[in-house]
Image: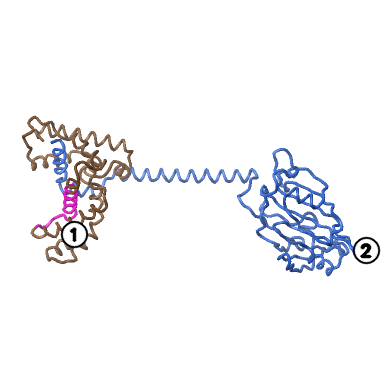
Amino acid sequence: MKDSRREEFLDLLGHVDEDILIKAIDMDDPEMTKRRAHIHMRRWKHIVWIAAALLLLAGSLTALGMGPLRDTWMATILFGNGSNEIVLESNVKLLDIRDDAPKTRLDVTLTQAEGITGIPFLSSSWYTSDAVYYRPWVPYQEKDPKGRRLGKGKEIERIDLWYPRCVVMPDGGGHISCSITLFTTHASENTILAGDGLDATGGKTGAKTCTLETLGVEAVLYRTDWDEERITAALIHNDVYYAFIGEGVSEERMEEFLHSLQ
Amino acid sequence: MEDSEIVEMFIQRSEDAIRQLDGRYGGLCRQVSYNILFNRQDMQECVNDTYLKVWESVPPQRPANLKAFVCKLVRCISINRLRFNTRQKRHQEMELLLSEVDECLPSTQDPSQHFDQQQTVELINRWLRTLDNATQLMFVRRYVLMESIPQLAATFALTKSNVSTRLYRARKQLKKYLEKEGVLI
């Protein structure tokens, strides 16, 4: 009985005047339109505020030195006092090194350096020495020149291995030293010069490339205009930067040596 | 195409009339039917039945307002389908709506006494015209077009509880009005 009364009444409600029904279908109410516009505006205001807050947060993170999220770096060589640039590789991966890698400078062997970092380095049968200097550090930051030091709480951002006179040619034929650089996943810079000091920014001449089929890479050979005895071969292999620096070594001997790398 | 042209096509018995009607008011019919049935298959059948009913009714009828005409038809057909389906298994939304309708019903002193339908419809229409614009729209969309409370809240840019409160007051008002006019249901 109750159900039938309700349904009957519901039927009756279906007989409302056509003008009232059409008005409800077409929804013409200025008050409501105004309210909807207001809510629409308020929603947009929220979106704009959230976007602004996110931008501010991103800006703050960058300012704090955390840098943008990325996983590669770019290895370049500057020529002619920075007027020219050769990009060795634009997407060199940042490497995961062992968590327990020492944060202090050490004198080690190449094999020990491999053990410390967990990364195998290029070797050659031409090597005549095994003494390597292990140098972990954080890259130079303009606002904090002393920030390279690995203090408490700082992570290793970059590792340099200096391998002096790794090859000494017989009969006074000169020697080759090697600078090895890798950036870790804690690195906070976007573009990192492949070399430091004079080697990075000093004038260079006679750049040529040399393909190393065994390694599947191209090395760039160049001479410096501030030391005519010096010849450098730079290359990237397995996301590690190598600069082989020859003193009194001919270009042909340097190329021969490069082909011995494995 | 204008409503009058579609009506003319029905009168001329043009088979394209239903296609034109569907193009113009198919969305509205499906929405009203779905609000009642909550079932897509039933909804489509009811919409098709509505078109058939229009085909059978026009002529002899010549609706002055085609939109209101099909809207009332599809509502009526959908409610009948709902009754037919099962009284026991009504969906929750319809149960809620019927319980709300209950609150509009005037008290009945004599259960055997039935009210005059035409008179009650006229009273309801008169009462609706006394409402403010927003409440009138809300009431019609809820109890004629069977829109749910969340739908209304979105349409009127109000909270669900705000919509419920407004409708509750309107129902109480309608009940009082009908009782005052001496309607017995």
- Identified by mark 2, the residue type is Gly
Which chain wears brown? Answer: B
The residue nearer to you, when weighing A76 against A160, is A160
Residue that appears at 22% across and 53% down: B29
SS assignment for the magenta stretch, majority:
helix
Mark whose residue sits in front, 1 or 2 = 2
Which chain wears blue? Answer: A
Determine whether the residue tagged by mark 2 lies in a helix, strand or loop.
helix
Q: Give neighbour class at mark 2: few <14, some 14-19, many 20+ (Cα, 10 Å).
A: few
Determine whether the residue tagged by mark 1 lies in a helix, strand or loop.
helix
- The image position of residue B1, as x and y in percent, is 22, 63
Residue farthest toward the top in the current orientation of the protein: B109
Residue that appears at 75% across and 43% down: A103
- Chain of residue at mark 2: A
Q: Quadrant of the C terminus of chain A?
A: bottom right
**Relative side of B38 to A54, left or right:** left
Residue placed under numbered mark 1 in the picture:
B3
- The image position of residue B133, as x and y in percent, is 23, 42
Segment colored magenta: B61-80
The residue nearer to you, when weighing B36 against A194, is B36
Using the image, tell me which numbered label, if any, was put on residue A172: 2
- Chain of residue at mark 1: B
- The image position of residue B26, as x and y in percent, is 24, 57
Have a look at marks 1 and 2 and say if they share a chain: no
Q: Is residue A189 above or below residue B19?
A: above
Residue that appears at 78% across and 43% down: A104
Using the image, tell me which numbered label, if any, was put on residue A44: none
- Identified by mark 1, the residue type is Asp
Distance (Cα) linking label 1 and label 2: 105 Å
Q: Which colour assignment does the render follow?
A: by chain
Quadrant location of residue A244? bottom right
